[in-house]
Image: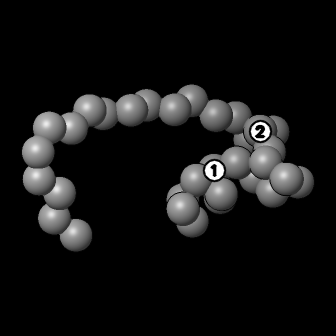
Amino acid sequence: MKIEGKAKMLTIYIGEGDRYHHRPLYQVLVER
């Protein structure tokens, strides 16, 4: 995948206990 144009870096800090719909948040973010 090639992305052109301006970009910004985003850092998200999440913990092991953070969940989204009973699933680990890190797992949901990686799948999307």
Check the image and report above or below for 16 versus 28: above
| Element type at mark 2 | loop
Residue of label 1: 26
**Residue 28 place in picture, x, y as percent:** 65, 57
The mark found on residue 17 in the picture is none
Task: State the quadrant of the C terminus.
Answer: bottom right
The residue closer to the viewer here, 6 or 30, is 6
Q: Residue furthest right?
A: 22
The residue positioned 11% from the left and 53% from the top of the image is 4
Secondary structure at badge 1 equals helix
x, y percent for residue 3? 17, 57
Residue 1: where, in percent of width, then height? 22, 70
Toward which corner of the image does residue 6 lie, by quadrant?
top left
Position of 30 relative to 7 (above/below): below
Image check: 24 left or right of 3?
A: right
> Which residue is situated farthest in the bottom direction here?
1
Residue closer to the observer: 9 or 16: 9
